[in-house]
Amino acid sequence: MSTTTLTADALPLSTQRYRVILAGICALILSVGLARFAYTPMLPIMRQHAGLTDVTGGWLATINYAGYMSGALLAAFVGDLRLKFHIYRIGLVLALLTTLAMGLTADPWLWAGLRLLAGFSSTAGLLLASGLVLNWLIRHQHRPELGLHFAGVGLGIVVSGVAVVGTLACSLSWDEQWLALGALGLLFFVPAWAWMPQPPHTSVQAIAAQPSAGAVRWMRLLIGSYFCAGFGFVISATFIVAILDKLPQLAGHGGWVWTVVGAAAVPSSFLWDRAAQRWGGINALLVAYGLQGVSVLLPAASADVSLNLLSAALYGVTFVGIVSLSLALIGRRFPDNPAKAMARLTLSYGVAQILAPAMAGYIAQATGSYHGALWITAAVLAVGMGLLVALNRVRE
């Protein structure tokens, strides 16, 4: 056993808990906030200064989510938590390097490769770190809640939004902005690497009981509804800044719009945890899907600045809650190895994230706006709500 492990184990359990959660938060800020989501406020800047088209921008987002899905597939088929821990660390390294490398080339094919690897790296924070943190909490008799951990998603969005605004204020070019984002990522890389403990070796795999017909139907309905959530998530995650940046009053202020999303997302996981305790997890998800549908429709229905900023805030409040509530439901059903079960659920989310951005890019190029994609997204979210209603009626 290493000196580092001995030192960490000697700390009070409450201190260890906060270090583990902080490691997960830093992993989310690095791999999701910077490596993955910084692309959103950078999209209009790259479109203006780097020659990026709507279609190419949509395809880069699709490729990014394909990378994320490949990471989710890997996590789904790897059962060993220790191996997952090593993949988590590889993801941290990739997140840092791909963010830096975006500023070292103007070749769309190289951008595509970097966005693919960045998507894979985001699995480290959003999926593997979530499973590692949840496993640690369960093993140490803490409540298996991920609200504090998922605050890292909102913080990551705030960090990337403020960083893009700050680098613009310093008159950095688009490529220098990416280099600055990569340098910023190093601050979060160190605690994410050093404070996430390696899980213990488990030599005996428990044999899973044959699930009942009700449990199988329950899982299928949740997977279907989560696909719809992925569709709703990715359209706004990719294009909300580009959509609002076209409004005259918000032109050139896309970074601040993204910061509004992040600021709304930071406390949302705590609020949805409370909502789940009061109403039940599935009912809380229904409310979150409904509010996200409203957030998608507002930019399509109105050019009013205040309503569009409300849309950004509603999106921030809901998307983290949907992820946190859904993964917590799965985590409670599969406490021994939650990352594997989470990965299987996340595959449906990933399929939606591959299909939706390319569709939106083509619609935007053909029509000159994203409104058609927004109406389609609202309809998909309505289908997701219908599946949740059916899910609530399933007897396990």
Image (tube, grey):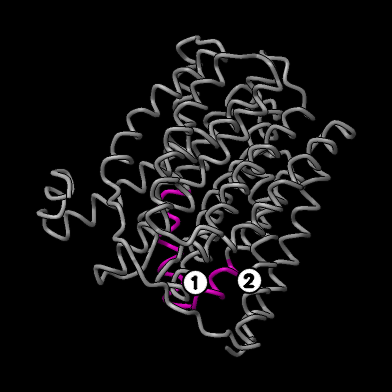
Q: What residue is rendered at 55% in x and 16% in y?
A: 103
Element carrying mark 1: helix
Q: Residue at x 65, y 22 (%)?
A: 110
From which residue to which does the magenta span run?
Answer: 265-287
**In the image, residue 21 lies at what x, y percent?**
30, 52
What amino acid type should be assigned to the residue bearing mark 2?
Leu
Nearest to N terminus: mark 2 or mark 1: 2
Residue 382 location, quadrant: bottom right
- Vertical side of 279 occupied by 212: above or below: below
Is residue 378 positioned above or below 119 on the image?
below
Question: Circle 2 is placed at which residue position?
Answer: 222
Q: How many angstroms separate mark 2 from mark 1 (CA)?
A: 10 Å
Q: Where, by quadrant of the figure, is residue 357 drawn?
A: top right
User: Residue 251's spot in the image, x, y percent?
Assistant: 65, 24
Instruction: Locate residue 214, reporting x and y percent.
Output: 63, 87
Residue to which mark 1 is pinned:
329
In the rendered structure, does residue 21 fall within the stretch colored magenta?
Answer: no
The numbered mark at residue 110 is none
Q: Are marks 2 and 1 in contact (CB under 8 Å)?
A: yes
Q: Amino acid at mark 1?
A: Leu
Instruction: Check disc 2 and report its element: helix, strand or loop.
Output: helix
**Image quadrant occupied by the C terminus:** bottom right
Q: Tag 1: Cα neighbours inside 10 Å, few (<14), some, or many (≥20)?
A: some
Q: Residues within 10 Å of mark 2 (few under 14, many from 20)?
A: many
In-front residue for pair 96/58: 96
* Image-quadrant location for residue 252: top right
Q: Is residue 201 left or right of residue 281?
A: left
Q: Residue at x 52, y 62 (%)?
A: 342
- Tell me if 379 is positioned left or right of 142 in this view: right
